[in-house]
Structures are given as structure tokens and as C-alpha cells.
Image: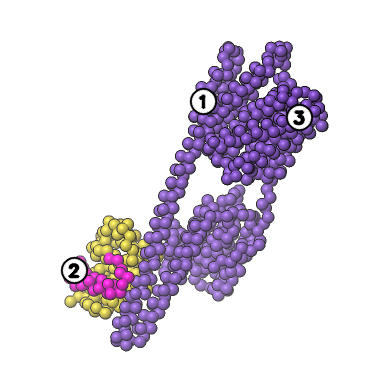
Chain colours: A purple, B yellow
Amino acid sequence: MYRPTKTSVMTLNREFPKAELLLAIAYLVTSYMAVWIAREGSGFSSFWPPNAIMLGCLIRLSNLNVPMTFALCALAAMTGNLLLGDGMTVSATLMLVNMIEVGVSYYLIRRVFRSGIDFASIAHWIGIMLLTAFVGTGITATFGAMVTQEMFQSSFWVILPVWWLSDSVGMFLFLPAVLSFQLFNSEPLTRLRALETAGLLLVFLTLYELRVTFLADLSIIFFIPLIVWIAFRFGIFATSIFNISLSTEDLATLLAPVTTSISSELSTEQIMGVRLGLVFMSCTTLALAISTQSNRESEKRLQASNTRLAQLNSEMHNLLHIVSHDLKSPLVTVQGFVGLLRHHLKTDAKDAMLNDIERVESGTRVMSELIEDTLEFSTTDRTKAQPQWFNFDPLFQDVAEVLEGQLKQKEVTLTLSTPAATLKADEVKVRQAVLNLVENALKYGCPEPGMTIDVNARQEDNEARITVSDNGPGIDPRYHERIFKLFSRVDNDSEGTGAGLAIVAKVANQHDGEAGVNSAPSKGAEFWLTLNS
Amino acid sequence: MELVHFLLIEDNDAHAELLEQTFEANRFTNKISHVPSADLAIKFLRQEAGYEDAERPHVILLDLNLPGMSGLEFLELVKSDPEYKAIPVVVLTTSSSPTDLTRAYELYANSYLTKPVDFGRFAEMVDHLNLYWGVMNVSPD
């Protein structure tokens, strides 16, 4: 009944690169912070945690525009360096080194995880860590050490491990943030979780202050049990925040004396030791958090798919029941009138025989309609909605064109109120639904010539509401719900199997919307359909 | 002897005709009135507009799958109305669903028959229906 999609699709697919820009801003802030910490500290070789933020864009390869993300992050890195007072050449070199580092990691991740990354898998997670933190940074550290040797005649073998380790530590410390960022895509932050996390942070900071003031002897190990508990209780998000704040704070405290006067008392080995400790702690708690989160998530996924399966099963049962019942009915007709025909043959009752034949014909016709409509319904049911941007106007025009003949024949006026609004939905399915609604109004809402059908669309926030109203005989409220069920009809004078509205309801359902009717006897009927994008 | 009056509630014309012809082919002492929906059946029973001359049926033959008010809803209505609840209701449907069957008996249906696809068996069922409800059974007046 419906025709192929016309090429009237609005090209609104190029949206503002929000995610890319957010990543770049995060990158700017963290690179600024990291370089600041490094310089305030000891002038220690640059500390590049922001690389880990860049990982966020690497990990989200499929969703982000990769060149755009790279360009924005490069710009952010450059700005960060310039803000910290580096010269143009130094800033550009540092940015370049950084981009190479990220580019190498990007390439490696794509090579190793061809079939996609599973965040619930600890093996994958460790793989990403190793690849990005050791191999990626190893290559750039080698490059950096070579350059430094050339430019400042320093020893390649002294610079390489320091550079390598520092960069890797940065990766480890900020990877939790990247993972949290990624996980939020699958599990949104609820208000409760946000409050819990904020509360925990408060407790943590208080404890931290107490530790600095009264318990200065205790090391960061004091916090390990707390963090392990949080890993179990709150998952990755809270653990990440803890790890980040703890390590940043600890590092700052650790490095504070260096900037004042006793810089010589704190050896490079000591700083390395503390950093290694932080790496170890981050790894352990994150692994715990990921494993509990992954259990929780796989359980949730299992539950969701079970519910879905049960629902599908019951829908299939219903469909089978309805179809078998409704198909049996024309079979009874056909077989019955063939039987009567045989009887009438004996008595040579020609008129009766003709009637029998007509009944057989109409029985098979009904059967074929039922089969076709069942197929159409199950096709709508089976195919997933493929949302795209389109305009209401051409869609309504299409429907009007398809029904032009029937409208003329019944002398029905069709008015289309077409707002300029666009809609993100499956155009083919929506066209089918609108067509069914107008056909339905024609069939049941226009018993005599000269009536009107109004088609209207309205867009509010993310919800579009399409209404099709007629001024026909209306529908008793008792049947408002039932008419949307497959093969259910209100009156038996009109043709049709009663699949049209069931398809409308299905389309609404597939767009997280609803379908319904406002009507009362002799008051006309307003059928509506909502779609969410 | 008074004719046994069957009220057939059936939306499918072809099925109604089939049943009437088969009844006729067996020609017993009965007569059939046919209404195509439960809403009209209510009017028939109450002798409302269009059915002023309708006679009270002795037996109701009820299809379940009806447009508008469903057969089960009609059954519930009739069996809770003191005026009509004594009239035996024979459900006559294509549905062999256990839910429909149980529900019909819960709503005090007096019998439940499924329409056989095979015409021979259909005619046989109509014979038996006729014999049992039209001849042997004594219905209240």
C-alpha cells in the first residue's frame, strides 16, 4: 500500500560536535593542571595525564569524529602550553609529541581490538592499559629522549625511563576518568548516585585533612580499605574520583616541600616510589570496581533480555492465537459452502449454487486479506525503527496523494496542517501509520459524502504528536482500547480486517510513543499518535 | 407444539447463512432469528427500536468474536440480568482457546461448541445441536 520513500529527507545529520568539544575542554583543563603540578613540583619531566583523556576519544572511535577530535585536542594542548608560559616552539613541540603518542595508541587499539572493546572485560581493560600506557608512551619517550639527547646532550638512557614512566603514570591515573566517561554512556548518572558520590567525597576530604593534620605518619595505605569498599559499593565512577583526587592531592603534598626549601631531601627515587605506589593502588581498586560493575551490568543485561524475551514470547503467542482463530473462520465458510454446493448440485438449485460459489470466493478473499495483513503487521513488528530526520509536510502530501482516488470517490475533504517542524523517526513506518489512520478515518469516520478529515502534527521538545480527526459517527469509549488490537473491529459493515490500527500502535510503540483515540458516539473521532526521538 | 426459537448472534454473514441453511436442511421444529452483533442482541431481547416484535428466544447461540461488544461481555451482561439469565446460552465459535472456554463457563455459558472446519462434521454438529437444544432439552419459557 505504501510507496518507497521519496527524497525529501532533511539533511540535519551534521550536528554540533558537542562531545568532541567537551573532550577538548577536558583535555585543556587537565593538561594545564598536569603541567602546573609538574612544574610547581620539581621541574620533573613533564607529566602527561591528559593523554588518558585523549584515550576517551580513541575509545569512542565509533561515535566521535576522529579528525575533528584530534584537531580540537591538539589545539587544546597547544593553548595549555602557551597559557603556562612556554614559547611557541616549545608548545608546538610538546603538542606534537603528545599527538604522536595518542596517534600511536589509537593505531594500536584499532589493530588489537578490531571487533570492539568490551568494557566489562578486565582482559580488555588491562590490554588497553598496557597498549596505551607502555607501548604508546614507550615509543614517544624514545623519540623524546632522542630529541633531548640531540638538543641538550643529555644521556638518552637517563631521560628515556624517566620520561616513559612519568607518562605512563599519567595514563594510569587518568584512565579511571576516561573509563567513567565511557561507562556513563551505558549507565546514566542518577541523582541518587551523584549525591552519594558527593557525600563520599566530602567524607574523604575531611579524612584527608585529618590525616594531614593529626595523622601525618600514616601513608596513603590508610585509605586503601576505604577505597576498596567504595570500589565494591559504588563501582567505577566513585572509585575513579577517589583515585584521581587522592593521587593528585598526594602528589601535590609530596612535592610541596620541594618547592619550598628542602628540595634536595626528596630524591627522584622517592618520588618514583610514591608514583609506583599510586599506580599499583589505582590498578587494584579499579580492577575491583570493574569486576563488580561488570557483574552488576551483566546481571542487569540478562534480566533485561529475559524480560524482553518473555514479552516477545507472549506477543508471539497472542499473534499465533489470533491468526489461527481468524484464519479458521474463512475456512469454515469455504468448506461449509462447498458442502452446501455439493448438496445443491443434487437438487440442481442453480441460484443457490451461484450463491455458494460467491461465498466460497469471498471466504478465500478474506483469507488472503488476513494473510497479507498478518504479514504486514509482522513486518512492522519485526523490523527495527531506523530514525532519520525528515519533514512532516512532504510525508502528509504523500499520504494525500496515495489516497486521492478514495477521497474523491467518497467526496471527503482532507486538510493538512503541516508545521515546519522536522521529526527524527523511521519515515517509512510513520508514513504507514499516518496512511492507516487516514484510511481508517475514511472507512469508519466518513459514512456519507461531504465529510472532512483533518491531519495535524505538533512537535514539543522531543515528542511529536500526529492527530487525524474526522466528524463521523464516533466510537463508544468502551472500544477505545480494543480497536488497537490486531483484527479487532467495531462494526461489521465496513471492509477491512482490523490490522491498520494495530500497526499504528506498533509504530508508536517502536518510537517510545503511544497511540489512542478521543471520541464519543456522534462526536467524531480524533486518533492520535506520539513519537519520541 | 411450540417452535423452539433460537437467537443466533453472529457477525459473519457467511457463517450465519451456513448455519441457517444447515438448520433448514435438517428441518426440525425450530425457527432462527439472526442478529449481527451483541449490541443488537440486547435490543432484540429488550424489544427496543427495530425489534419491537421480537419474540423471547428459547436458546441463544452466541459467537464470541464480535465487533463492538464481545461475546463474553454479552454473556456476562445476560447472565447477570434476572430477566434473561435463565435463557440457555450456547457458545458457538471458531475459537478453541482454553482461556475463552474457561471464561465462558465461568460466566455461566450453558454449552460451548467450536465450529468444525469440515462441512460433514459441521452439519453433524448442527444436527446434534438441533436435536439436543431444540428437541430433547426443555428450556424455560
- From the image, tell me which residue sits under label 2: B137
Residue A166 versus residue A402 in the image, above or below: above
The residue lying at 69 percent from left, 12 percent from top is A265
Dividing the image into 4 quarters, which one contains the N terminus of chain A? bottom right
Mark in front: 1 vs 2 = 1
Q: Chain of mark 1?
A: A
Q: Which label belongs to residue A228?
A: 1
Badge 2: residue crowd in 10 Å (few <14, some 14–19, many ≥20): few
Q: Amino acid at mark 3?
A: Met
Which mark sits nearer the N-terminus, 3 or 1?
3
Residue B134 included in the magenta stretch of the image: yes
Q: Which circle, 3 or 2, is nearer the viewer? A: 3
Considering the numbered disc 1 on the image, is that residue within a helix, a strand or a loop? helix
Residue A364 horizontal/vertical position (percent): 41, 74
Circle 2: residue type = Asn
Of the two numbered discs 3 and 1 in the rendering, the one whose residue sits closer to the viewer? 3
Quarter of the figure with residue A164: top right
Magenta stretch encompasses residue A283: no
Residue A471 in sight = no
Q: Residue at x 38, y 71 (%)?
A: A330
Residue at left offset 24%, top offset 78%:
B26
The image's mark for residue A406 is: none
Give me the disc on residue A146: 3
Q: Is residue A341 left or right of residue A396?
A: left
Q: Is residue B20 visible?
A: yes
- Tell me where the magenta segment starts and ends, as one range: B113-141
Q: CA distance from mark 3 to mark 1?
A: 41 Å
